[in-house]
Amino acid sequence: MSEIVLDARGLSCPLPVLKANRMLRGLQPGARLRVIATDRASVADFQAFCRETGHALIAFGEEGGTLSFVIRRRPDAAAGPATVSMPA
């Protein structure tokens, strides 16, 4: 499966998460987004973001001061709220 890459190097908290959230909204359920960042606060930010939104943080690591996060977009919720019919 291919990944979309978001380069957030040089951006400070909370911009990497905000930009990732915007991109995830436009992706299909199950799609993967790789975020490249340099802000150390991104580690805790992306862990909390994924925990709170239902997206899966499937990998993260660091190499040479550059952080990499792979996020899988959550499945869409069921087809909206249930409707109740009232008798006439």
Image (spheres, rainbow, N blue to C red):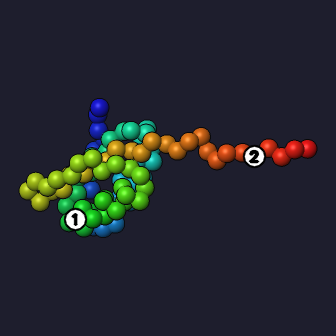
Mark 1–mark 2 distance (CA, rounded to whole Å): 48 Å
Q: What residue lies at 49% left-to-right and 42% top-to-bottom?
A: 76
The amino acid on which the numbered mark 2 sits, given as a three-letter code, is: Val
The residue under label 1 is: 39
- Disc with the residue nearer the chain's start (1 vs 2): 1
Residue at the right extreme, as displayed: 88
Relative vertical location of residue 9 with respect to residue 40 in this rendering, above or below: above
Relative image position of residue 20 (x, y in whole percent): 36, 53
Against 65, is 29 above or below? above
Residue depicted at 25% across the width and 67% down the height:
41
Residue at 43 percent across and 39 percent down: it is: 29
**Mark 2 residue element:** loop
Residue 39 versus residue 86: which sits nearer the camera? 86
Quadrant the N terminus occupies: top left
Q: Position of residue 19 (x, y in %)?
A: 37, 56
The answer to which image quadrant residue 52 occupies is bottom left
Which amino acid is tagged 1? Asp
Which quadrant of the figure has residue 12?
bottom left
Q: Secondary structure at mark 1?
A: loop
Placement of 49 over or under 56, stated as above or below: below
